[in-house]
Image (cartoon, coloured by chain):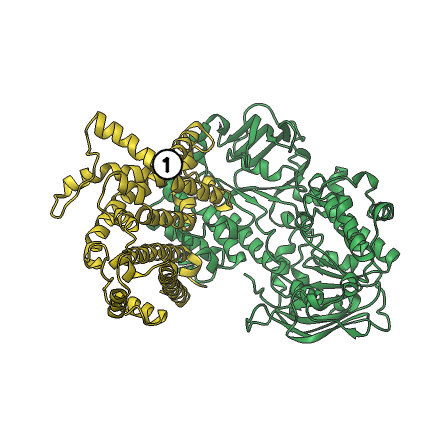
Amino acid sequence: MADKQPKPGQPKPGQPKSGVLLDIRNLRIEATVYPPGEAPKNIVLVHDVSLTLEKGKVLGLIGESGAGKSTIGLSSMGYGRGGVRITGGEVILNGRDILKGGNEGFRKLRGREVCYVAQSAAAAFNPAHRLMDQVVEAALLHGTATRAEAEKRAVALFKKLSLPNPESIGERFPHQVSGGQLQRVMTAMALCSEPDLIVFDEPTTALDVTTQIDVLAAIKDAIRDTHVAALYITHDLAVVAQVSDEIMVLRHGRLVEWGGTRQIIKEPRQEYTNALVSVHEIEHQEQKPGTSPFLSVKNITAAYGRSHIKVLKNVSIDIFPGQTLAVVGESGSGKSTLARAITGLLPPEQGTVTFDGRPLANRLADRPKEDLRQLQMIYQMADVAMNPRQTVGTIIGRPLEFYFGLRGRQRDARVAELLDKIEMGKGYVDRYPAELSGGQKQRVCIARSLAAKPKLIICDEVTSALDPLVAHGILELLLGLQKEENVAYLFITHDLATVKSIADSIAVMYRGEVVRYGAKSTVLTPPFDAYTDLLLSSVPEMEIGWLEKAIKGRRMASAGN
Amino acid sequence: MSSPIVKLVAQRIALGILLLLAVSVLIFAGTQILPGDVAQAILGQSATPESLANLREQLGLNDPAYIRYFRWLGGILTGDLGTAMSSGQDIATSIKGRLWNTLFLAFWAAVVAVPLAIILGLIAVRYRNGWVDKLISGLALASTSFPEFFVGYVLVFFFAVQHQWFPAISTVYDGMPFGERIQAIALPAAALTLVVLAHMMRMTRAAILNVMQSAYVETAELKGLSAFAVIRRHAFPNAIAPIINVVMLNLAYLIVGVVVVEVIFVYPGMGQYLVDHVTKRDVPVVQAVGLIFAAVYISLNIIADIAAIIANPRLRHPK
């Protein structure tokens, strides 16, 4: 594999080799952006990228957000999202330049020669139609099969993708099927019209880590058995290493490196690839728990509305000054509900939250301002956690006015000091959130919570929406601030690598209960309970053949698929 | 049908009935607050106090208000709408023919307007932001912006005066052949269509455009469906609830709001009947017509609600 090495940006001139399915040459993609109050301007999303893909092979496209991965993938179908235009180069599929075919040509090729698997199958299926109607739609449209043939093929694909009740699942509506299952049905939908190429656009990113592993295995088997070629787009190198023959690393719409999977993950030649590949675990020496916790959650049980389904069951945790408790678990395990119970947003039905030796009022409205100040929160989506019409200065200054009554020059000085702490500098005071990058937005949110000088900051998936390198920076910042300010964190995450980097103690949650709780070293040392074992063994490792090993070694089936 | 739908539908119907009762109280109370009473109205200013007292006794006007309300409501529920003061005729009998006429006009206006509005909306989405879209929106908005009487008289001027294709006055009578009847109502139906078209068209367009942002529309495009098939098969079914809502509002308007158009074309429908009796201060008739209009309005909105509930696959097919 590693010996086939076309040089980046220099496609081989002349005839395509036999067996080449897709040959993209010097692709240039542009879009027009309309910044408010300015003249519209053209930006180049993809600069001069070339790639070839042989029949039946899988090429992984990898990079951070904005790298142009999806844009390149969709260009193989002649599709540009929201005004994105292909302005240069050739896209040669099965020996012909599809860009010359016009809209009519694109329609003939979409759904027949090239199919697409989207990131969120839950959103990509039409809620108004039964799954089967959607799965066979492309095959019927292009006349590649009769309805009966197409349905038969679909059922066979459902079986191959190990969906439950393959004969009848097609009768269901999208909302009646879980996210992991939908992702497989979408793969079946792409395979149903027997295309030559499938574009997988982050197909497992939206899934829980324990579900991801099953879907990944199903996709890998289906690709192998149907001999379809694939462009596999993801930001997760460990995932792409499991399914790809070759990997292409992209950054800012430019090609960085392209090679066999083994070469890219074992012997990266470019510095950027190396940064992506190397493990970013922060060495964090766990602190021994102090003598007395300042915040203590005792036997909390909570439910939404008058539902009898308990989202939290008898949960107890302790938080010590200046330390980090990580709460891990998959979606629906009650992590965020625990945060809501502690902050008073969701008053628990039973149990108490003790703060500095006295009980906290259950309801947010009953808590004095001083208690509110001591507990701050940072959210996953920094975007929507800030008022888009306020400047950074106003956003950070607000808690200073509200809790400490700081005004004027005093306030401005403190805002500058906080900006300095988050390594952003005074220049950002007058910026609006829309003018910041994702990582900078999260930093401003951190500064806002620090402004209240709290004892505890609850971090709810604060790095999940960020690219790995940016997330790494945020984690280092949080650790640094913890040392300086002696603030404690309740760190909610589904990402175990993050947990290892930041936690002093860990609570593993599963279906509303804490199934494992203790110091980091204890929790992460065998023997494990079945669920913690599943969770730990499901985290993709950057190792060829990891997927098969992990599936084989499991003691418990994941619930979410 | 599954239980959540039955429950929701039952809730809507119960709420509708409750609302209608509340409206009937308001209508009854409204007429009580007005100065003078029925006896005074019947006998006129020159009546002697004795004859007034006699008539009041006779009509039961001396009973407390709530007893009179229930007597009135009971009458309505058994089909007795009372007697018109001005003519002494039974209201139910005179309303029957007129209600039928109004429904006939509204029905044919709707048969033209609703499909036309939805198809124009679909076309506008297909060619969104292009000249076709702008032309459709422009014409539809223009026709709505003109007052109904203006549209009505313009139609009369062109199609009745200049070309004499249709009669300027929509006379209908019992036993009139269907074809002639349709010809008679052509102009008022056209005027009504022009008035309600834009609202439904614009809402259809907006509702579908909203859905066009969804990921599943992209999925459909990436299957190679033509632009129109994407709209019809994938966007439209998910925009159906808001579209039904605006269609029902406009249907209600076709029945309840036809007063002006009926007067222009001297069409013997409910609107004209109402206007006639308002000028005569014939309170029982106004009450009866008001209640019928309220019932129509509320029922159509209940139908819209129920249709939206049934259109939602999550409610139709619970987990």
Residue A461 in the image, given as x and y percentages of width and height = 69, 56
Relative to A416, is A546 above or below? Answer: below
**Which of the 4 quarters of the picture holds residue A171?**
bottom left
Please give the chain letter of the residue carrying mark 1. Answer: B
Quarter in which the N terminus of chain A is drawn: top right
Q: What amino acid is at disc 1? A: Pro
- Which element is circle 1 on? loop
**Colour assignment, chain A:** green
**Colour assignment, chain B:** yellow
Q: What is the residue that sits farthest to the top in this orientation?
A: A14
Residue A65 in the image, given as x and y percentages of width and height = 66, 42
Q: Residues within 10 Å of mark 1 (few under 14, many from 20)?
A: few
Residue B98 in the image, given as x and y percentages of width and height = 22, 50
Relative to A305, is B222 above or below? Answer: above
Quarter in which the C terminus of chain A is drawn: bottom right
Residue occupying the point 73% across, 46% down = A441
Residue B142 in the image, given as x and y percentages of width and height = 40, 32
Instruction: Please say whether residue B219 is visible from this viewpoint.
Output: no
Looking at the image, which is closer to me, B140 or A212? B140
In the picture, measured across the screen, residue B193 lies left or right of residue A204, that is left
In the picture, measured across the screen, residue B277 lies left or right of residue A233, that is left
Relative to B33, is B153 above or below? Answer: above
Looking at the image, which is closer to me, B84 or A411? B84
In the picture, measured across the screen, residue B291 lies left or right of residue B211, that is left
**Residue assigned mark 1:** B147
Looking at the image, which is closer to me, A285 or A5? A285
Residue occupying the point 65% across, 48% down = A241
